[in-house]
Amino acid sequence: MFRFIVRRLLQAIPTLLGISIVVFLMVHLAPGDPVLIMLGSQEQAVTPERIAELREAWGFNDPLYVQYWRFLKDALRGDLGRSIYTGQDVFQSIAQRIPATLLLTVSSLIVAVAVSVPIGIISATRQYSAWDYIGMVGALLGVSMPTFWFALLAMFLFSLKLGWLPATGMGHLANGIGDVIKHLIMPSLTLGFGMAAMTTRLTRSSMLDVIRQDYIRTAKAKGLSERVVIYRHALKNALIPIVTVIGTQFGSLLGGAVVTETIFAWPGMGRQAVASITRRDLPMIQGNVLFMCLIFVLVNLLVDISYSWLDPRIRYD
Amino acid sequence: MDNTSQQQKRSLWIDVWARFKKNRLAMIGLCVIIFLYLVALFAPVLAPYPYDKMNLTNLYASPGSPGHILGTDEFGRDVLSRLIYGARISLTVGLVVVGMASAIGVTLGALAGYYGGWVDSLIMRIVDFLYAFPFFILAITIVAILGPSLYNAMFALALVSWIGYARMVRGQFLALKQREFVEAAKAVGASGFRIMFVHLLPNALGPVIVQMSLGVAGAILSASGLSFLGLGAQPPTAEWGAMLNAGKDYIRSAPHLATYPGLAIMITVLAFNFVGDGLRDALDPKLKQ
């Protein structure tokens, strides 16, 4: 088990390097002089001589691989440059926002699993019943609904009309944990429901696959109750594809977090990324994209490792 | 021989259509899509006003006010007219993104599946690598590099969504290329290109079509998301996501500005999802049981 985890960790390194190359190239692929891009809004005041000077000083005259090596070394030391717009250290401002994004995405994930797995099981075990029909149409509606629209409607209803929940922000721990939870409810539910819609359909089809297997018939034949058969025998086997999809869906959760954070003014990385894109704050964009990809890779790593717990047959040697 | 294969091909699609017709939700979806295309096509005739005609004396008119069934927006523009023109953009975005993505994905997937070896390794490494990125974040990144615009948003979405088609077509080709009809085609001296696109591709088309139909839904949703973030269509373009973005600031005083564009997106996406699901069931009746 330990060796499997180590091997999987090592396998993630090329992916991470690839991601770092793409993120590094962003500055060079963007149309325009990288020096002017890095100068941002100050560019009007700069003479051509000064630009040439800065190009040399910032190392843009070096070959690309030298620049990349420098970028990588700095990044590994936690130095991702400074924001063009605020002058803030990129790494630090990301570090400040990671907890908010993780809090939002993980609670949305919990919402999604808590909603989708039971509905998926009910739909599968009572296939073609009214419950199944309602569940599946509901899931299809959920897949088709833009998260940002759902979020706005929720905000309109629960904050502006009913006044039950705060519309924006994350609250402060200083006001007690309840304050943060109150602020978390709407963002995590809207983000979680979107994902739940996708996993519900998958849970259903995965359960349907499993409950037609011979070992389920055997379990039923030896007189086990429906409950035990479904939850002890079928669910654990049906979970493997579900867990896989939860891993890949975590990516869309991160993408959705960008939108949800923007709407609810949630102080996470997604909102920061969008704000820096509109300002063309490239070091900030680089840093945020890098970290969101990093989180995604790590989550999929965890998913891979959890396979071997769910199904001991899956252990790559 | 050509004749019989022609007949068989036709009867397959007739069977599919017969099964598809029985699926009520899928038929509703199809009707909605046809309706939306007609609306998009005849937008200048159907829209009561030009989509960018401002009227600063009649701002935030609520739905049902005289001359404006769905009200007016923050510039006094008619919301209904903008929604009608918005259908043009969303439907075009869906088709263009899926067209580009499937063209790239099917071609590369076909090459990988048919030739195998280093071609396969190279293409699939690229696919695996792109799968390591969160889809929407990668699209945002590409838009960030190129600058926010509707064209760049479409380009970005196509660039990140071809991998699904490549994987699917490769898998199909790997299974199909062992079959006798491929051997027969090789024996009569058909070129690799001909075998791939004339013999193999039609047999692999079913899942690709399903994926395309669902892909249009996804592309419309993602593109409107990018526009909502201000990274896609720019004002004064009447794009549903961009309309929602502008409307969100007035949600307290004029909630209709955010409600209708979202509804339009949902109905369109839902219709394509219904059709995609219906096609999947119709193409593979075994799955349904």
Image (spheres, coloured by chain):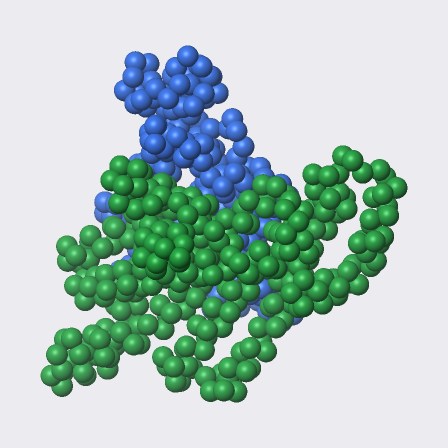
Chain colours: A green, B blue
Q: Is residue A140 above or below residue B236?
A: below
Q: x%, y% of residue A220?
A: 15, 80
Q: Please report the residue visible at 49 percent of the width from the left and 87 percent of the height from the top.
A: A2
How far from the left and from the top, in percent, is residue A37? Answer: 72, 44
Residue found 49% across the figure and 73% down from its top: A301
Q: Residue at x 27, y 69 (%)?
A: A207
Q: Nearer the viewer, residue A15 or A152?
A: A152
Q: Quadrant of the C terminus of chain B?
A: bottom left
Q: Is residue A247 left or right of residue A179?
A: right
Which residue occupies the foreground of this view, A179 or A62? A179
Residue extending farthest front? A174
Residue B105 image-quadrant placement = bottom right
Q: How many marks?
A: 0
Residue B15 location in percent, x, y?
A: 30, 51
Residue in view at x 41 percent, y 77 percent: A306
**Would you say A214 lies left or right of A53 here?**
left
Closer to the camera in the image, A315 or A51: A51
Q: Position of residue A210 (x, y in %)?
A: 27, 73
- Does residue A29 show up? no
Q: Answer with left or right where residue A294 lies relative to residue A160.
A: right
Dividing the picture into quarters, in which one does residue A6 lie? bottom right
Let me know if residue A197 appears in the view: yes
> Toward the viewer: A101 or A151?
A101
